[in-house]
Image (spheres, grey):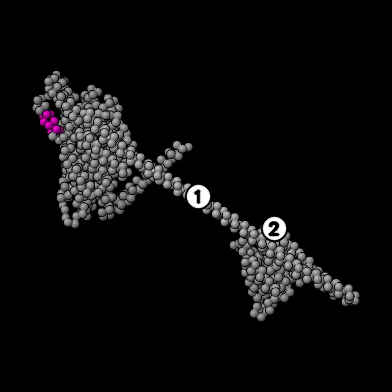
């Protein structure tokens, strides 16, 4: 289960990362699609070309040509310098040296144009130095390239651009690698790696791992090289860097060559060659053909070896890389082991070796001595073979001796130690932060618990108070009912008692009227007692009982007076009312009906009781004489009705007029 969660989180992370990257690409493409003539469009075209040059060279070129057109149109030097820099590299990679030199010269002229208002001059000059350095490095002129790259590096430090600074550190490291100064190369690769790691730039980190791996290959430490190349491949796969993957395949081929696994080496070289041809990377194809030729020579497949070496030589000539032409020539001489090679060719080979020495390409110079030693050994001219063999071993030892390898390892270990210490510091900081967060969480939990307890007490107190309040209300109601029993029923019973006493003293012909009053009073007592018993009786269906009682009451009284009525109170079915509500609604209803029947002379009554928005509404309408509220003498009946409405927290509206009938409306909340 835990593993599944980790995998899910990992997938979510990369999904978000890829979405963010795609979002950036989409936004740049959206700007490009507007075809606007502005700085933003030129920058977007250049940015997209930078990405595409490693995966879709034709589309990258089309964007660069468009950026060039807009840059010239707007005289935007900064954007033009970026465009020219990329075009130099694109055309050189495609072995179109004249075009590459044209854009390099254009970039140089641009860097020499400076005005007082030109705030981008340093950026333009930086781009020129970087492009010139890259051009010379690809041409094999490492010493000259190093000068340009260092000038660019110094200007970038002044401009405070960490990403560009890390990129130039990689270029300087590559120059030192070409000069076989492995320790200086590693020093700059690690500077670049620190910068890219700080920026979270994975493409840059992949470059660094790739080049550190290349350094280990040159030192003959193939297992160490393999671990770095694998790191590079992981990052290049994540960032979809096709060109970078081609370089990694080339490095794997060199590693397996070094450990004697020739078939594996050829497999990786073939993959690398396919990518370089697809992306039109002539410089890379030249190197791959050279290494494939060496492999086939080791396998004694001479024809295949010569074929690849000649291809490498042809591409090197197209690129103007004389050093690589020399290397290919010497490999061909060593592979063919021809005995009839003229002295003129040997003299030319020695001149070319001198050029290698002057350019600082120590690794190729050593390989040239080895090839001549193999050639003379094949001719059985052992004295010359020994001479060149000694030169080879002396030079090879100077660049790959134990001291250099030890120092190289120390530089790497120092970086790893520094990185580990930083990670430990970060972990310690994280631990401190986690401890603080835990403390805060404990405090928050404690506060939350206290709040919950307080709220619980408050809720308990509220409901307890409400319950107590309800009990008090019921007690008051019972006290009131008791008072009603005493006042109304008691007075009626007293009246009956007095009338019965009077009847005893009267003659028989006078008793009928008194007995009639006794009967009437007794009926009132029974009715009042029935009402009181009903009010205090607990019943879950109080709404339904209230409806039935109301309907029975109006039926009895209307029948006696021959009054037609309509009664609509279906909403009361299933309604739960309190004792107070039952009592007051019924008594208001009863009072209103009594008044209508006794005083209005109506022949029709209409009663409607409904529920709307948790409010009970009762409307009682008669069609009798009505009255003028300003003239009528309000009795206890109307005042009692108003008092009962107030007790229900409701309103009582009475609308009446002479000959218009009367409408009594009660409205109160059920909550």
| Residue 129 image position (x, y, % from top left) | 18, 45
Tell me the SS state at disc 1: helix
Q: 10 Å neighbourhood of mark 1: few (<14), some, or many (≥20)?
A: few
As drawn, 651 above or below 204: below
The circle on residue 541 is 2
Q: Quadrant of residue 240?
A: top left
From what the image shows, is residue 413 above or below residue 481?
A: above
Rendered image quadrant of residue 516: bottom right
Where residue 267 sits: x, y (%)?
Answer: 29, 29
Classified by dominant secondary structure, the portion drawn in magenta counts as helix
Quarter of the rendering occupied by the C terminus: bottom right
Closer-to-camera residue (95/665): 665
Q: Nearer the viewer, residue 387 or 100?
A: 387
Earlier-in-chain disc, 1 versus 2? 1
Where does residue 173 sit, x and y in percent of width and height? 22, 38
Asked if residue 464 shows in the view, the reply is yes
Magenta part of the protein: which range?
348-357
Above or below, comparing residue 539 to residue 341 in the picture: below
- The extreme bottom residue here reads 631
Q: Residue at x 24, y 38 (%)?
A: 187
Q: Give the SS element for disc 2.
A: loop
């Amino acid at each position: 289960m835990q593993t599944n969660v980790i995998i899910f989180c990992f997938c979510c992370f990369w999904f978000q990362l890829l979405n963010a990257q795609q979002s950036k690409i989409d936004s740049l493409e959206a700007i490009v699609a507007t075809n606007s003539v502005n700085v933003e469009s030129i920058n977007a075209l250049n940015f997209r070309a930078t990405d595409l040059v490693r995966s879709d060279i034709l589309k990258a070129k089309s964007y660069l040509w468009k950026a060039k057109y807009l840059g010239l149109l707007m005289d935007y030097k900064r954007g033009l310098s970026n465009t020219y820099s990329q075009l130099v590299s694109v055309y050189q990679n495609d072995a179109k040296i004249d075009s590459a030199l044209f854009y390099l010269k254009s970039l140089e002229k641009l860097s020499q144009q400076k005005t007082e208002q030109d705030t981008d001059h340093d950026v333009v000059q930086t781009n020129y130095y970087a492009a010139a350095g890259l051009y010379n490095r690809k041409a094999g002129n490492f010493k000259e390239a190093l000068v340009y790259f260092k000038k660019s590096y110094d200007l970038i430090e002044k401009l405070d651009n960490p990403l560009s600074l890390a990129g130039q550190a990689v270029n300087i490291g590559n120059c030192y690698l070409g000069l076989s100064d492995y320790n200086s190369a590693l020093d700059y690769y690690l500077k670049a790696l620190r910068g890219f790691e700080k920026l979270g730039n994975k493409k840059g980190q992949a470059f660094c791992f790739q080049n550190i791996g290349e350094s280990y290959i040159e030192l003959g430490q193939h297992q160490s090289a393999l671990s770095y190349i694998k790191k590079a491949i992981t990052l290049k796969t994540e960032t979809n860097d096709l060109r970078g993957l081609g370089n990694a395949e080339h490095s794997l081929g060199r590693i397996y060559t070094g450990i004697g696994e020739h078939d594996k080496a050829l497999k990786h070289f073939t993959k690398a060659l396919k990518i370089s041809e697809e992306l039109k990377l002539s410089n890379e194809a030249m190197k791959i053909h050279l290494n494939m030729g060496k492999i086939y020579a080791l396998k004694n497949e001479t024809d295949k070896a010569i074929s690849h070496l000649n291809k490498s030589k042809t591409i090197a000539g197209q690129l103007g890389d004389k050093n690589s032409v020399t290397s290919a020539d010497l490999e061909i001489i060593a592979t063919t082991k021809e005995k009839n090679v003229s002295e003129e060719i040997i003299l030319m080979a020695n001149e070319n070796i001198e050029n290698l020495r002057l350019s600082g390409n120590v690794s190729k110079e050593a390989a040239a001595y080895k090839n001549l030693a193999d050639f003379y050994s094949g001719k059985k001219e052992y004295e010359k073979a020994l001479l060149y063999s000694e030169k080879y071993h002396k030079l090879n030892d100077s660049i790959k001796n134990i001291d250099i390898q030890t120092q190289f390892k120390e530089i790497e270990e120092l970086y790893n130690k520094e990185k580990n210490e930083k990670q430990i510091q970060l972990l310690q900081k994280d631990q401190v932060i986690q401890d603080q967060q835990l403390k805060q969480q404990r405090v928050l939990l404690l506060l939350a618990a206290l709040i919950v307890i307080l709220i619980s007490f408050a809720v308990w107190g509220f409901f307890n108070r409400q319950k107590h309040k309800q009990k008090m209300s019921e007690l008051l109601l019972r006290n009131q009912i008791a008072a009603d029993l005493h006042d109304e029923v008691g007075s009626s019973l007293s009246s009956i008692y007095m009338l019965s006493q009077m009847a005893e003293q009267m003659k028989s012909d006078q008793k009928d009227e008194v007995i009639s009053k006794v009967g009437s009073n007794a009926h009132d007592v029974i009715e009042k007692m029935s009402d009181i018993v009903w009010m205090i009786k607990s019943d879950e269906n109080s709404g339904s009982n209230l409806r039935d009682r109301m309907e029975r009451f109006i039926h009895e009284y209307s029948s006696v007076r021959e009054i037609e009525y309509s009664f609509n109170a279906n909403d009361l079915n299933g309604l739960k009312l309190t004792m107070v509500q039952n009592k007051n609604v019924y008594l208001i209803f009863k009072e209103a009906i009594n008044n209508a029947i006794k005083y209005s002379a109506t022949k029709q009554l209409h009663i409607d009781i409904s529920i709307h928005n948790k409010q009970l509404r009762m409307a009682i309408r008669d069609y009798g004489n009505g009255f003028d509220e300003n003239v009528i003498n309000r009795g206890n009946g109307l005042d009692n009705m108003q008092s009962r409405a107030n007790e229900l927290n409701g309103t009582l509206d009475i609308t009446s007029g002479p000959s218009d009938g009367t409408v009594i409306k009660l409205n109160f909340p059920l909550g």
